Image: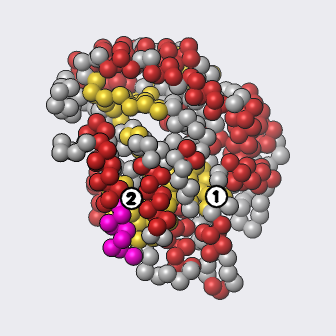
Amino acid sequence: MKEWDSFNEIVKAKGMWLTDSNGNNLLDGVASMWCNVWGHSKPELINAITKQSKKLQHSSMFNLTNEPAEILAESLVKISPGMHRVFYSDNGSSAMEIAIKMALQYWNNIGEMKKTKIATLENGYHGDTFGAMSVGYVPEFFGKFKKQLFPTIQIPVPNKYRIPKEYSYLDYQNFCLDKIEKQFSKDDKIAAFVMESGAQVAGGVNIFPKGFQRRISKICKKYNILLVLDEIATGFGRLGSMIQYTEQKSIPDIVAYGKMLTGGYITMAATLANKKIYDSFLGEFYDWKHLFHGHTFTGNPLSSAVANENLRLYKKNNLIKKIQKTSKVFEEYYDEIGEIETVGDIRHKGMLMGIELVKDKKNKTPIHPKKSINKIFFEEGKKHGIYLRTLGNIVMLVPPLAISEEELDLLLNRTINTIKSAQNQIL
Ligand SMILES: Cc1ncc(COP(=O)(O)O)c(C=O)c1O
């Protein structure tokens, strides 16, 4: 906070552009924290909220239900192969807490009391609440709470740019997969394996190599360990597929969605489970098999109504196809970005790009400037008319999914200029 003496107040937004109280327009390169789909002020989404707000703003999912939430649950199950039921919450961290509780309680429900451990990938991120921090332990973010977090088994993850010297990329993938297999074969107390689907985003835009996730899902099956996937940042088109786990050929037992579920308009998240998990929670009341979890705004009708409209628009506009085409624009800029003095690596899939900045390219030395790189790039980005954020040394480009090719061109050009003019402040 010491670095931030003031903040730009965003007063309105339209399409891909945010407008602050001084009248400055910023192209939204962050999709308002990775959740915006159609751009801002989309009439259909506003109408869905307005219409619903005149009928029912909120009731509860304790003993009750509501139509928009029911319609949404049906749609989510329909687009999610292998999934059977939906549990709503209002943010991604909660959706992951629920996923973890479901996975742990499943084993308890079926009488396998010893299965209580969770395994995860190093460098994953699943949110900021305690369970989510435990399974998604990024040391820089959560080191201060290490003692309070529950222990997990952490498996190394291949990052193509930073593979240990003695390995090739492929060898290191096999090394990680072998580690999982060895761990699973010797430990029958593992309940679930938790990972992001397709890529680790907050952990540095680490896109999984082809087949990696599929092989993990196979190992999980072999050792009867539940697979819990987090598609909060990577599903719904961010990586170019509606449901990332279908592309990865790895059907989970439990999956979490969030962020883009409502087009990024109202907070909502969902945890979906397969029939095996769901059925284990059914019992007589005094069997105490139910999931003791519920949030005030679970299944909120406004969020559900806008999510339903959002899903309708995905279909109507063939958004996934459009993303696949538009995202090719990123590729046209690989060379130009790669030539910048401080750019060590570019990682890109779908509507996600991470540009890793280094002190020197040859040794891949990380940068440690006095100020936060995020602050430097945010200020510099503003001068170029873009809203940009970095995560550590990585410049993230996460635009609204429906961005046009022209606007993506503009975003990339302005990002290049921003990096060029900011880099002497960080070296
Ligand atoms: C993969 C992943 N999981 C979970 C979360 C947490 O979501 P929320 O910020 O809505 O709690 C995030 C947020 O960035 C995320 O990227």
- Tell me what residue is drawn at x 65 percent, y 41 percent: 262
Amino acid under label 1?
Gly
**Residue 382 falls in which quadrant of the image?**
top left
Residue 227 shows up from this direction = yes
Picture residue at 72% right of the left edge, 59% below the top: 60
- The numbered mark at residue 142 is none
In the image, is residue 350 part of the stretch drawn in magenta?
A: no
Q: Name above or below for residue 387 compared with residue 238.
A: above
- Which mark is first along the chain, 2 or 1? 1
Q: Is 182 within the magenta?
A: yes
Whole-percent x, y for residue 190 in the image: 41, 71
Q: Could you say where residue 345 lies in the image, as x and y percent from the top left? A: 31, 29
* Residue identified by numbered label 1: 82
Q: Which mark is residue 120?
A: 2
Q: Is residue 92 visible?
A: no
> At x 41% / y 40%, what residue is drawn?
207
- Dividing the picture into quadrants, the one containing residue 424 is top left
Give amino acid for label 2: Thr
Gap between marks 1 and 2, in whole Å?
22 Å
Judge by depth and name the residue closer to the eye, 171 or 325.
Answer: 171
Q: Position of residue 370 (x, y in %)?
A: 20, 30
Figure coloring: secondary structure
**Span of residues in magenta:** 180-188
Q: Are marks 1 and 2 in contact (CB under 8 Å)?
A: no
Residue in view at x 56 percent, y 22 percent: 326
List x then y, in percent, for residue 244.
55, 44
Ligand 1 neighbours mark 2 (CB distance < 8 Å): no
Q: Quadrant of the N terminus?
A: top left
